[in-house]
Image (tube, coloured by chain):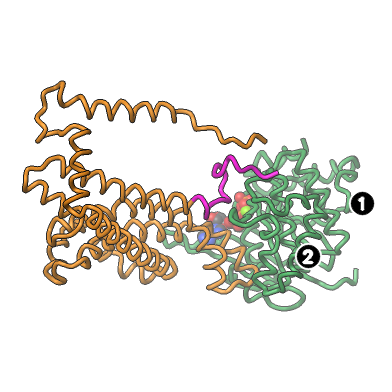
Chain colours: A orange, B green
Amino acid sequence: MSARPRLPPGAAASVALLVVFLAAWEWGPGLLRIPSYIIPSLSEVAREAVRMWQVSHVLMHTGVTAGEVLAGFALGSLLGAFIGYLLGMSPATEVALSPYILALQIAPKVAFAPLFILWMGYSVYPKILVAVLIVFFPVMVNVLTAIRTVDPDLINLARSFKATRAQIFWKIEFPASIPALFAGLRIGATLAVVGVVVGEFVGGNLGLGFLLTFGEGQANTPMVFVSIVLLTLIGGIAYLGVVLTEQRVLHYLPGRNANRRVG
Amino acid sequence: MARATRLEYRNVTMRFADTAGRGVTAVAGVSLAIADAEVVALIGPSGCGKSTLLNIGAGLYAPTDGAAFVDGERVEGPNAHVAFMLQKDLLLPWRTVAENVMLGAEIHGQPRSQRRRRAHELLDGFGLGEFAGRYPHQLSGGMRQRAALARTLAVEPSVLLLDEPFSAVDAQTRMVLQRDLARTLTRAGKTALLITHDLFEAVTLSDRVLVMSARPGRILEEMTIDLPEREDPLARRRDPRVNDYVARLMDRLQIGEDTLEPQAIGGGA
Ligand SMILES: Nc1ncnc2c1ncn2[C@@H]1O[C@H](COP(=O)(O)OP(=O)(O)OP(=O)(O)O)[C@@H](O)[C@H]1O
Ligand SMILES: [Mg+2]
């Protein structure tokens, strides 16, 4: 077995595309005479990043936002998974609650941000709460659907071995739902950033969402860009974290860890 | 024939409420008895209630009327003396082959070392020893079905309910699996009810074949297979008398109703 994993096809093209993109960002605005308060060039954004590092406590703001994202994502996923499993195990509860869940799901969650700020003031909590609310739904819906669609013959197999309800859950339903749970977590990881940023837009003087609106108020376009890049980075790291965990947990599925063949 | 009765259906009727609210009678007044160490094949047109009977025997469905008995005890729910196997292997993708085989014993709370030893014994017996640590997706269809059979046997049931266990594998693999099953059943002296659409399978693997009518299913006929070597279906298959039995079953199925599925006569190819 050759040990060296080969890069997937298209990886080279992907890197090339990045180089082209960065080059276009650096020289495109100048060539097209786009003023820098509309699209600042790459080097202007980089200079602004250095300035923000020195005077604007950008690291602290990034840390606050990252912390809120992490807390919101963790709590939202836990709650979503818990309620998803609960409703999945009890169809009657699901029928009773489904209209309200649907209503909440349709309601734009970020619109709750001002309300939460009214309730909890300019702290990190309303931001976390918006993230919790927004992460909750995809995780819950995915888990619920997964529990609903477990092959009934698998359940019958466990029943034929006289499995208890708890055994059916832990040995069949829960492991069968893991792929769907991770699909929900992936969506949740990106949505958590949205929830937190909207919360920071609405109130407070902390976090990248705040820096973003602050930059906007000062017509400091490079600052807005830096904030967007950092937010994207936080979302990306959260997403990557989920994907890496998923690969470890779902190692038994075909097509994953293709390089780590057995035998 | 003074052998004890292991599995018995007494006057079993099963009605399902369908979505429109009207009832569907799947089986009507079925009575049958299977003696210890006997293998009985059950054939009949699609939808006649064969799987329903199996589910009742396994204690998964409660019959509308009548009852199933295992070792003289009325089946009230799943019980440890009966195990079933379906066309689908139902292997859990997140468990290794050995862990899948151990599932039943694990649910029963058997000690880990004991169930592991049993699983490896069974897997070795089925030529799957080296695959014990693999995941199901790394096995071929025939190997997976063999692992499913090992899982069924791992709980040491006295009665096996087999619902078209080999209909999803290719013809050659099927013959090998049929031989493995026949050997295992004979050597361990297990009682089995084998549902199949393959008339050759029915004749070569069993002591007796029951023919069911179209829905609502009833037992139309019972045919004792008077052939030697039940433990070797490959040898039986060469016996010209097998063809006579199959021909008679074909006749019987076609007289009942002309809903016979084409696969029922294609199995001997
Ligand atoms: N859980 C159920 N709910 C409602 N109807 C059912 C249920 N299970 C079976 N039926 C109905 O009972 C009848 C018999 O079904 P069953 O699966 O026992 O047939 P079968 O003989 O096994 O058919 P096949 O050979 O195609 O497997 C069918 O009409 C089916 O629609
Ligand atoms: Mg069936």
Q: Which residue occupies the foreground of this view, B169 or A84?
A: A84
Closest to the camera, between mark 1 and mark 2, is 2
Are the residues tagged 1 and 2 within 8 Å (C-beta)? no
- Residue found 76% across the figure and 45% down from its top: B199
Q: Looking at the image, is A216 positioned above or below residue A72?
A: above
The residue at the far bottom in this view is: B73
Taking the image as four quarters, which one is ligand 1 found in? bottom right
Q: Which mark is residue A182?
A: none
Residue B248 seen in the figure: no
Q: Chain of mark 1?
A: B
Q: Which residue is mark 2?
A: B117
Find the distance from the CA under tag 1 to the CA under tag 2. Answer: 31 Å
Q: Looking at the image, is B62 positioned above or below residue A195?
A: below
The residue at the far right in this view is: B228
| Count of residue discs | 2
Expressed as whole percent of the image width and height from the top left, the position of residue B125 reads 83, 55
The yes-or-no answer for disc 1 within 8 Å of ligand 1 is: no
Q: Which residue occupies the foreground of this view, A163 or A210?
A: A210
- Residue found 51% across the figure and 32% down from its top: A7
